[in-house]
């Protein structure tokens, strides 16, 4: 029975280097290929783990031969692949190792078929759904272990990470790094799953989101990498009674199609897109090359999101399997050779897997501690009620003796409630209490009841939270039928043994083949010359074949190198052209001072915190909001000197930053004129002027003087002004001699 299923080998503390396991799977010819009469150019020897590929353009050349940990032909079943290749990896994840499965290959060769398969057909279920079954049935069967299973699903497209389980599908996630746990995706959703059905549901949601976000699903899926991540945490009590937590992470990666993307002819945005499309994939190839090379001290993990995220799986703390998928048809020859050569290189990567024991970020530990805390809280609340009960029973309960046994049967809460009820009845029934007091006592009682109710609700909440958290943790040993079915277990074990035997056999056959060449050297003694000739011819033939194979490898490598160089040159040319365009724009449209300021702010961030590298524009050194710019003194807003001057010079509203509206009322047009006296003829005016001049003496008229026959006064003399003034001061009619100044009435005059 598996108890966390740790074998003795797993428990060795020493990290043993372990090669990446590489298997090749060739899909059957599809309907169109059959209809078009394409040739099959692949020979697969599953027993030896060998695959031979004939070149359709050079039929006489001997076939290319590759050897892998296992090869699967078109007849291979999904379950066979899982049991032989992936089951042991998932087992080690359950034991606390990290595990990664990559599906690599040209589009349409069966990567998605291998990883996901056909959902509705149990026979054609791929690795991911099979691993779900495996994980949960393992948990069911295990004893004394507590598990927590989480699932996440993400996609990398054009170097952008999208969480396929998040509600907001437009959000792009960032990679972050922590010294203790390594690289991780910030804010990635992870769902706790309690059963196969739940985790399948999570996967279904992710798949739906994957297709929703894409405009052309086929193109999108062939250019994006999808990673399904299952984290299994397991807590087990050791012999000393201490609990240990092991955390295994299983990455299942459906890579983008490995075929070459045509990069030529693209400009601007399209060029940027094209250079990004397979960046992760080519970075993966570079990382593999650097790891295998052994000479390079720098492994370019940081070149892409994919390699950063899966750094552990390539030369680090993980067990890794790569499935190289390929098509059997003749027209796929070039891509198939590239895939096989890629896979052949990956075989030489050495990993150092180890069990992740008691890591700091184990969620299971957090859950256990939280549950412990909540339980303690619940305990404290319950005992609090208990204490109250005792206190009350001491003061109010009349008969403690016989009731104690009955008390035990009811819950403390019910007891309290009953007691309150009794007290209430007693108060209501008691005639000696006056109405006011009764009211008060009843009110107090109601308050107590409310408190009791609140207490009950809080306890219920706590209990449900505990239950909720506990339900997320899975304990094995519940499925008794599974546990007791020893026969089935036995059968599985023997099947596993057969598989291991087969793998061993394959390994030995491969070794024999390798040694065959060297064995010929040892046959030194020959019975006859003819025999010597025969043996040496045979040896020569073998060596010649080897030489040819090596030569082909060399020419392949040279050709590949040239092709890559050509592509790089083309990309370089296109980028140079882009650069020239940008330079022209900058030279003509960006003021030199601005450009200088911008260049001072910009910096290239390699390995930046924000993830990836690129140019970053620092915040301007001058804080715009810190104070008013000099040009704005006296104004409410920053205004340029030019605008200020133009505004002051009356440039109209064009240069006004504010108050451009005229809010004063227009007065109505006047309909009246000011009064102006009649104009005086100049002669008259002069005369009047003369007459009114005060410096001139006043003309005094003697009215008493005899009138001339024409009626004019005869006596008129000028007096000095001062004298006239004094004479004028005298009130008229009071003067003693004023009477003779006026004409006397002559009475009736006879006619
Ligand atoms: P990829 O993901 O590599 O682009 P798919 O997994 O979508 O390719 O496979 C393309 C087609 O080939 C699918 O229709 C799939 O069902 C079929 N196919 C791939 N591999 C196999 C196989 N081993 N057996 C049967 N059908 C296969
Ligand atoms: Mg696919």
Image (cartoon, rainbow, N blue to C red):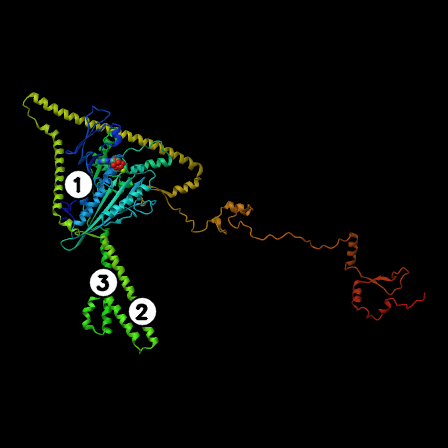
Q: Earlier in the sequence, mark 1 or mark 3?
A: 1
User: Which x, y percent locates residue 364?
Assistant: 22, 52
Q: Among all residues in the image, which is located at the extreme bottom?
A: 432
- Dot 2 lies on which element? helix
Badge count: 3
Q: Among all residues in the image, which is located at the extreme left?
A: 527
User: Which x, y percent locates residue 19?
Assistant: 18, 39
User: Which x, y percent locates residue 645?
Assistant: 53, 46
Is 331 located above or below residue 194 in the figure? Answer: above
Q: Check disc 3 and report the residue beneath it.
A: 379
Q: Label for residue 529?
A: none
Q: CA distance from mark 1 to mark 2?
A: 67 Å
Q: Earlier in the sequence, mark 1 or mark 2?
A: 1
- Dot 1 lies on which element? helix
Is 22 located above or below residue 689 in the figure? Answer: above
Q: Earlier in the sequence, mark 3 or mark 2?
A: 3
Q: Residues within 10 Å of mark 2 (few under 14, many from 20)?
A: some
713 or 557, which is in the foreground? Answer: 557
Dividing the picture into quarters, in which one does residue 581 lie?
top left
Q: Is residue 439 left or right of residue 687?
A: left
Q: Label for residue 446?
A: 2
Q: Residues within 10 Å of mark 1 (few under 14, many from 20)?
A: some
Q: Check disc 1 and report the residue beneath it.
A: 83
Q: CA distance from mark 3 to mark 2?
A: 26 Å
């Amino acid at each position: 029975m598996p108890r966390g299923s740790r074998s003795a080998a797993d428990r060795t503390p020493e990290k043993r280097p372990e090669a990446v396991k590489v298997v090749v799977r060739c899909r059957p010819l599809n309907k169109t290929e059959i209809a078009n009469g394409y040739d099959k150019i692949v020979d697969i020897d599953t027993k030896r783990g060998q695959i031979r590929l004939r070149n359709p353009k050079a039929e006489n050349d001997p076939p290319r031969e590759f050897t892998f940990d296992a090869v699967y032909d078109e007849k291979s079943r999904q379950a066979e692949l899982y049991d032989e290749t992936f089951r042991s990896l998932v087992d080690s994840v359950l034991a606390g190792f990290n595990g990664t499965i990559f599906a690599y290959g040209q589009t349409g060769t069966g990567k998605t078929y291998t990883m996901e398969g056909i959902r509705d057909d149990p026979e054609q279920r791929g690795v991911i759904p099979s691993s779900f079954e495996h994980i949960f049935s393992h948990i069911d069967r295990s004893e004394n272990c507590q598990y927590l299973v989480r699932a996440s699903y993400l996609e990398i497209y054009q170097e952008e990470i999208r969480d396929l389980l998040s509600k907001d599908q437009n959000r792009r996630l960032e990679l972050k790094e922590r010294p203790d746990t390594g690289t991780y995706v910030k804010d990635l959703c992870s769902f706790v799953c309690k059963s196969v059905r739940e985790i399948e549901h999570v996967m279904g949601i992710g798949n739906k989101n994957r297709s929703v976000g894409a405009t052309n699903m086929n193109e999108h899926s062939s250019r994006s990498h999808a990673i399904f991540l299952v984290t299994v945490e397991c807590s087990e009590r050791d012999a000393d009674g201490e609990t240990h937590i092991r955390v295994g992470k299983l990455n299942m990666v459906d890579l983008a199609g490995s075929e070459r993307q045509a990069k030529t002819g693209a400009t601007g945005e399209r060029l940027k897109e094209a250079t990004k499309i397979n960046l992760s994939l080519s970075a993966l190839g570079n990382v593999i090359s650097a790891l295998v090379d052994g000479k390079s001290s720098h492994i370019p993990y940081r070149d892409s999101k994919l390699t950063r995220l899966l750094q552990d799986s390539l030369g680090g703390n993980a067990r890794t399997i790569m499935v190289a998928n390929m098509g059997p048809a003749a027209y796929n020859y070039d891509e198939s050779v590239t895939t096989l050569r890629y896979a052949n290189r990956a075989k030489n990567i050495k990993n150092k897997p180890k069990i992740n024991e008691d890591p700091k970020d184990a969620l299971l530990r957090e859950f256990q501690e939280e549950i412990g805390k909540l339980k303690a809280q619940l305990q404290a609340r319950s005992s609090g009620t208990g204490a109250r009960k005792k206190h009350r029973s001491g003061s109010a309960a009349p008969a403690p003796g016989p009731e104690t046994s009955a008390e035990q049967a009811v819950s403390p809460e019910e007891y309290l409630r009953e007691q309150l009820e009794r007290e209430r009845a007693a108060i209501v029934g008691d005639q000696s209490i006056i109405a006011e007091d009764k009211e008060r006592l009843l009110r107090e009682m109601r308050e107590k009841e409310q408190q009791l109710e609140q207490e009950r609700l809080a306890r219920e909440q706590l209990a449900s939270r505990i239950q909720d958290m506990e339900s997320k943790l899975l304990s094995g040993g519940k499925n008794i039928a599974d546990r007791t079915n020893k026969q089935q277990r036995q059968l599985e074990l023997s099947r596993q043994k057969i598989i291991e035997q087969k793998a061993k056999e394959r390994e030995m056959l491969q070794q024999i083949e390798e040694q065959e060449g060297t064995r010929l050297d040892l046959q030194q003694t020959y019975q006859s010359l003819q025999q010597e000739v025969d043996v040496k011819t045979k040896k020569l033939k073998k060596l010649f074949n080897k030489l040819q194979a090596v030569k082909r490898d060399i020419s392949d490598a040279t050709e590949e190198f040239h092709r890559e160089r050509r592509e790089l040159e083309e990309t370089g040319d296109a980028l140079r052209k882009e650069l020239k365009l940008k330079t022209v724009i900058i030279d003509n449209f960006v003021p030199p001072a601005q450009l200088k300021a911008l260049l001072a702010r910009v910096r290239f961030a390699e390995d930046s915190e924000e993830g990836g590298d690129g140019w970053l524009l620092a915040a301007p050194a001058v804080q715009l909001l810190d104070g008013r710019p000099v040009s704005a003194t006296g104004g409410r807003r920053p205004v340029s000197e030019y605008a200020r001057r133009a505004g002051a010079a009356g440039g109209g509203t064009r240069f006004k930053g504010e108050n451009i509206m005229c809010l004063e009322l227009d007065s109505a047009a006047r309909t009246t004129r000011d009064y102006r006296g009649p104009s005086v003829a100049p002669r008259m005016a002069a005369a009047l002027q003369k007459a009114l001049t005060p410096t001139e003496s006043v003309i005094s008229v003697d009215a008493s003087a005899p009138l001339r026959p024409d009626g004019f006064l005869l006596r008129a003399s000028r007096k000095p002004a001062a004298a006239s003034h004094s004479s004028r001061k005298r009130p008229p009619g009071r003067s003693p001699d004023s009477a003779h100044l006026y004409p006397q009435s002559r009475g009736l005059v006879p006619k």
